[in-house]
Image: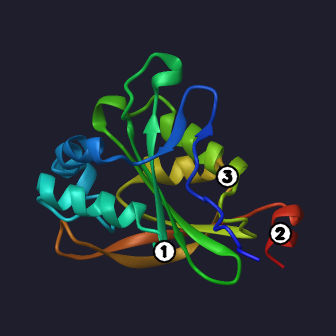
Amino acid sequence: MKIEPVDRQGTFTGTRVSLRPVEDGDAQLISRFANDQRVAHMTTNLPFPMSDEVAHEFIEDALAPARERDVWVIDGSISQQAPFLGLMTLDDLDRGQSEVGYWVAPDFWNRGYASEALATLIAANPHANASIVAAVFQDNPASARVLAANGFMHLGAAEAYCPSRGCHVPSWTYLRNLSDAAARKIA
């Protein structure tokens, strides 16, 4: 009997945005927005500066069959917005838990796209998680509000390395417990 791998990196649709897997054609936009310090300074996984070649490598890694991180484009096409608003990542941890990360291009800030994209990801629960964790830098209260609006509970303070800043930055850690049904899927 042959077991087919489950495609955890499908497309998930919300009201105004959808989450779709990254494509090679996204590399130029990824590098463009990652080279904006307002974006890069708020992430733990974007090198700065980022060349188009590094963006292509990022996409190759995101689409590799043996990946530990799923990456989606936050796509606004379904609401006649730009087809690339930002990125959302979900890193596979253990014990039925993943870590979410996200960023939205500055042109689309303060419109609720990150909140809706996160709600869409939670509803899809592609890793069949019992819980999702997240960390945001303390100088990024907008991302903390996105997490709180989606039912994440503040756990405490820590620090995380920011490649674009070249140092550890104070952060807040959050946890979102998901439904019992999701927890049973992984058992």
Element on which disc 1 rests? loop
> Is any atom of residue 112 visible in this view?
yes
The quarter of the picture where the N terminus appears is: bottom right
Q: For mark 2, does the 10 Å Cα neighbourhood hold few (<14), some (14 to 19), or many (20 or more) residues?
A: few
Which residue, given by chain and number where applicable, does mark 3 sit on? 122
The quarter of the picture where the C terminus appears is: bottom right
Which residue, given by chain and number where applicable, does mark 1 sit on? 68
User: Image point 45% across, 72% down: which residue?
Assistant: 67
Front of the two marks 1 and 3: 1
Q: For mark 1, does the 10 Å Cα neighbourhood hold few (<14), some (14 to 19), or many (20 or more) residues?
A: few
User: Image point 19% across, 43% down: which residue?
Assistant: 28
Q: Residue 115 at x, y = what percent?
A: 56, 41
Q: Locate residue 155: give its quadrant.
A: bottom right
Q: Locate residue 41: give its quadrant.
A: bottom left
User: Image point 31% across, 62% down: which residue?
Assistant: 60
> How far is disc 1 from disc 2 in space, using C-alphas?
19 Å
> How far is disc 1 from disc 3 in space, using C-alphas?
18 Å
The amino acid type of the residue labelled 2 equals: Lys
Q: Residue 167 at x, y = what percent?
A: 21, 77
Which residue, given by chain and number where applicable, does mark 2 sit on? 185
Q: Residue 34 at x, y = what percent?
A: 22, 51
Dot 1 or dot 2, earlier in sequence: 1
The amino acid type of the residue labelled 3 equals: Ile
Element on which disc 2 rests? helix
Drawn side of residue 147 relative to residue 171, left or right: right
Q: For mark 3, does the 10 Å Cα neighbourhood hold few (<14), some (14 to 19), or many (20 or more) residues?
A: some
Element on which disc 3 rests? helix
The amino acid type of the residue labelled 1 equals: Glu
Q: Locate residue 175: give its quadrant.
A: bottom right
Dot 1 or dot 3, earlier in sequence: 1
